[in-house]
Image (cartoon, helix red, strand yellow):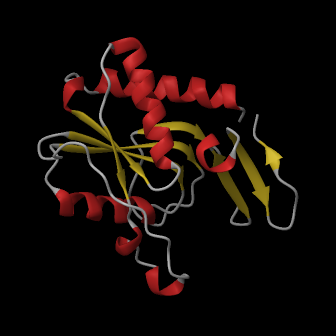
Amino acid sequence: MSSYDMSRTLMRIAHEIVERNQNSSDILLVGLQRRGVPLANRLSQAIESFEGFKVPVGSLDINFYRDDLSQRPLPLIHPTKLPVKIDDKIAILVDDVFYTGRTSRAALNALIDLGRPSLIQLAVMVDRGHRELPIRADYVGKNIPTTQNQTIQVRVDEYDGTEEVVLIEDNQPELALL
């Protein structure tokens, strides 16, 4: 998926968010650290381009809520920042890749510890399948079924110096998704 395709996809998701949530002023986009944050910012900019107001964007670090914390190296902790109280807001969690559902479960737990939104939704750039928990995304940029030996990477300028989505096979060169 090219930079152009990513922009078009995010614009489509932004329109879906506004169409589904009649009171757009109650929306809070919450990007999951790391790559969900730039995606949430892009969604906010897209909504502003056609609605005329900026949707607030926060960032959420879910590392201490993960159920695999003891099985991984110590994580790099990023700050959680919410520009407004989440009580009675429509909180839309934004992530790059939706896989097993465990990251989303951790995000739900982290968010609920911070307040009581009226509604929580999930927006993802890519859904690669292989769910282990009964969680689904409300907004999906692209469904890309993968094998267990494949990985999807969503690359953003802020961290990677490029905007693209790539498929990586174990021990193989990456394949751009077009």
Residue at position x 39%, y 40% from top? 138
Residue 146 visible here: no
Measured as percent of width and height from the top left, residue 98 is found at: 52, 53
What is the total number of numbered labels drawn onto the structure image?
A: 0
Q: Is residue 153 left or right of residue 32?
A: right
Image vertical order of residue 19 relative to residue 42, above or below: above
Q: Nearer the viewer, residue 146 or 83?
A: 83
Measured as percent of width and height from the top left, residue 134 is found at: 38, 60
Give residue 121's quadrant in the image.
top left
Q: Quadrant of the C terminus?
A: top right
Residue 85 visible here: yes
Image vertical order of residue 112 relative to residue 13, above or below: below
Measured as percent of width and height from the top left, residue 38 is found at: 50, 42
Q: Residue furthest bottom?
A: 70
Q: Quadrant of the N terminus?
A: top right
Residue at position x 32%, y 13% from top? 52
Q: Is residue 171 left or right of residue 48?
A: right
Residue at position x 45%, y 23% from top? 46
Image vertical order of residue 3 relative to residue 79, above or below: above
